Image (tube, rainbow, N blue to C red):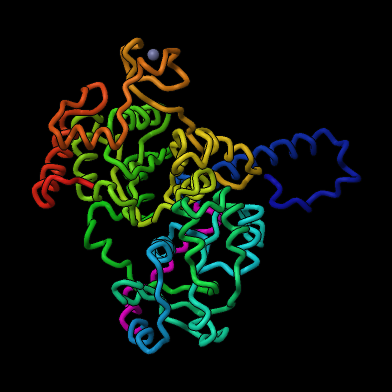
Amino acid sequence: MLPQDDNIFDFDNIIDSNEVKLLLKVYAHQREWRANVQFLMEEEAVSKLVGPHGGGGLKALLAPRAERAEQLVRARGLLKVPMTSREISDVLMMAMGAYTPLDGFMGKANWRRVCLDMKLKNGLFWPIPITLSCNKQLADSIHVGQEVALVDGESDEILAILEVSEKYVADKLLECEQVYRTTDAAHPGVQKVLEQGEINLAGQVICLSEGEYPAKYPELYIRPAQARAMFLENGWSSVAAFQTRNPMQRAHEYLVKIAIEVTDGVFIHQVLGKLKPGDIPAEVRTGAIQAMIDNYFVPGTVIQAGYPIEMRYAGPREALLHALIRQNYGCSHLIVGRDHAGVGDYYGPFDAHHIFDTLWDGALETRALKIDITFFCRRCYGMATGKTCPHDESERIHISGTEQRAMLVSGEDIPLEFARPEVISILRNYYAGLAESRGSSIG
Ligand SMILES: [Zn+2]
């Protein structure tokens, strides 16, 4: 017979007894065994994927379907606060649970702590402020405790209800210096911060719509809970996310394949939010990526998906946000290439790699899979990276986006070392269509 609880012995009196020592040893062994079984059972039941950020479950703020119609009627009677495209994208991220564990837009204490220390006021890691702003006149008409309807500034569609808990002025220059490492108004992310309204509104959000995304991208619009289910179904426990806003050329294909070598599978996760002018539209990009997957990947090693984030181009800080979001999706890794989420020359090529090394223990479960620039090298006669190829720049085949566009439009051949023919043909058709509809001038 084994003891059932820790208090059964009077240890001071009998601890020298060999018999009891033996009994204790058996007991300890049994406890360890029980703990192991318990652990294995829990692991099976929950999943082998990384847990959502914050240690709790996923927090998707989209109201249950049954309540949405009623909430929408209520929202129609509320004061409307128009949102910018970036604020809309943030609401959609909250709706799907990608911003777990946030429950709304940040107040001043969180905003400040995130800017300065990359932490919420409760100490939890968070790299970029998630805020909502409006002009002073509108803010003056709102009192703390009031509920307002958050609407798409362009379409006027109601997307959410915000219960205003705080109104505050945020120091935009401080935010830009800390988050973007520049206050240059030519930086597209900084520009948006500078253009924000004067007053930030904070509070809990109830999301009522996911906008046009689910209907527009029925296959691609995959929420974190769905992604987790798909990974488990594929038998994946280590998953690398590949963030992209471009069609995949061979350099991207190689990045993804490096990740497949060291994980169970790759989540090709593209930006469906607002892009820069001149970027290739999501529909065309999706087709091009699918052509790459169908022809050059082993079935079951990649999943193509998209999400509604709008790029901030905040470089290193945004790389961290991308990793945090991927943790919520269940991805153990994020592929971080050269100048991840950067723009122009604002960030060093490896700043987005180095910032992961500055995090404290427990900040983030999702790791960066840091990979240098990838290309085809004529001397290596194969795909290589800046880390593996010792040859000169002149041996490496690189075609910029602008050059590629010009080549596609003029019908010039694109080297097979750079791009796959199935992908080129889709892009060529797209540019041909553009040229037809707009005459010969391509923007
Ligand atoms: Zn080489």
* Residue for point 44% across, 34% down: 337
Q: In the rendering, at what x and y percent does residue 77 appear?
A: 38, 89
Above/below status of 128 relative to 39 = below
Q: Is residue 218 magenta?
A: no
- Magenta stretch, main secondary structure class: loop
Above/below status of 25 relative to 110 = above
Q: In the rendering, at what x and y percent does residue 297 appear?
A: 25, 30
Q: Is residue 67 magenta?
A: yes
Q: Farthest bottom residue?
A: 77
Apparent side of residue 193 relative to residue 65 in the rendered image (left or right): right
Please state, as top left, top right, bottom left or bottom right, where the N terminus lies in the image: top right
Residues 268 and 232: in front is: 268
* Residue for point 54% across, 72% down: 198
Please state the extent of the stretch shown in magenta in the rendering. 52-70
- Res. 202 visible in picture: no
Q: Farthest top residue?
A: 379
